[in-house]
Image (tube, grey):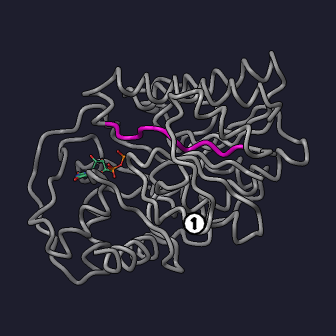
Amino acid sequence: MLLVTGGAGYIGSHVALELRRLGRDVVIFDDLSRGHRDLAGDSVLEVGDLKDISRVREVFARYTFDGVLHFAAKSLVGESMAEPLDYYRNNLVGTTNLLAVMKEHGVGRLVFSSTAAVYGEPETVPIVENAPKKPTNVYGDTKWFIETMLQNLNRAYGLRSVSLRYFNAAGADPGGSVGEDHTPETHLIPIALDVALGKREKLMLYGSDYPTPDGTCVRDYVHVSDLAQAHVLALERLEVGKAECEAYNLGNGKGFSVLEVLEAVRRITGCPIPVESAARRAGDPAVLVASSGLAENVLGWKQEFADIDVIVKTAWEWHKARA
Ligand code: UDP
């Protein structure tokens, strides 16, 4: 049995789906604050908040877990800058409780949902795993703190973990069962698709004076189903006892500016997508592009949906169906 915290959210639901497709038994633990009951699909859903340790203990007493995949966290850069205490409490207290209860029950395998935000403003791109960790926002700060905790817990108690540092997760399951549905929505592609659907009038372009070729931020968009595959590979690596405490970048290796993404959205939807220039968003680095060579070489990760048009198209299919 596997526990997927945050499995009713965007990335967690794709991972839980992939695990179910592989015949694994999955229990989802989610407080449904940002997740959706229907995204849990056929998995058992335990509604609860990781900050409530007695509730976590109750769930661990009910099932025997072989491993945990931990996604439950607040994950919005802008919100983390405005509400830092909320982020520290939610992400750090929640994770500490989870790790404590895993220890109580002798559950020694964890796949942790980390982020490119641990690097902050990178000195060189593409970013490799041992690049300096200097988060420029509170969200990234909480994730890096947890990665450091995992190193210390490995030394002290032998907890084995793989942290996966995603760049910009995008797209949706090509089968259409799960996809991205945030309230409030803050991410570029779903907002652009809302404009295409007529649900919003225009997209606010956060900063056009970055030191990039067209002045807008460059990001590395990686398909969420490819991310899901990497989690399965990470879990398998833990299950055969190969990993002690490891971290891998997961990205496309190719950067797209905000304007290039909007061009892809126009191509796929056939809609004009009006844009209005706005100030930079606090905490946004100019360029984030991954080197995913380590995940490819060590985990054997291969992307299936690396094309930006395919990423936008799967997101568009989901978005239209969900509207
Ligand atoms: N962005 C934008 N307008 C929006 C949403 C996002 O210009 O309405 C920009 C944002 O500043 C960033 C990029 O699009 O440079 C990707 O942002 P997103 O929130 O999707 O992901 P993040 O990089 O924060 O994880």
Does dot 1 land on a helix, a strand or a loop?
helix
Q: Residue drawn at (71%, 47%), measured in percent from left and top?
A: 294
Question: Residue 229 is drawn in which quadrant?
Answer: bottom right
Quick check: is the Cβ at mark 1 less than 8 Å away from ligand 1?
no
Is 47 drawn above or below residue 22 in the view shown? above
Q: Nearer the viewer, residue 182 or 43?
A: 43
Asked if residue 76 is among those painted magenta in the image, a careful observer would answer yes
Asked if residue 243 is among those painted magenta in the image, a careful observer would answer no
- Can you give x and y, in whole percent of width and height, for residue 5 in the image? 58, 45
- Can you give x and y, in whole percent of width and height, for residue 317 in the image? 38, 80
Image quarter hosting the C terminus: bottom left
Q: Nearer the viewer, residue 275 or 161?
A: 161
Q: Main structural element of the magenta stretch: helix, strand or loop? A: loop
- Can you give x and y, in whole percent of width and height, for residue 238 in the image? 82, 44
Q: Residue drawn at (44%, 52%), measured in percent from left and top?
A: 168
Circle 1 sits on which residue?
Answer: 225
State left or right for residue 194 relative to residue 151: left
Part of the protein shown in magenta? 68-77
Q: Residue drawn at (68%, 48%), measured in percent from left and top?
A: 3
State left or right for residue 202 relative to residue 100: left
Q: Nearer the viewer, residue 270 or 153?
A: 153
- Please state which amino acid type lies under the numbered disc 1: Ser
Is 17 drawn above or below residue 50 in the view shown? below
Question: Residue 40 is drawn in which quadrant?
Answer: bottom right
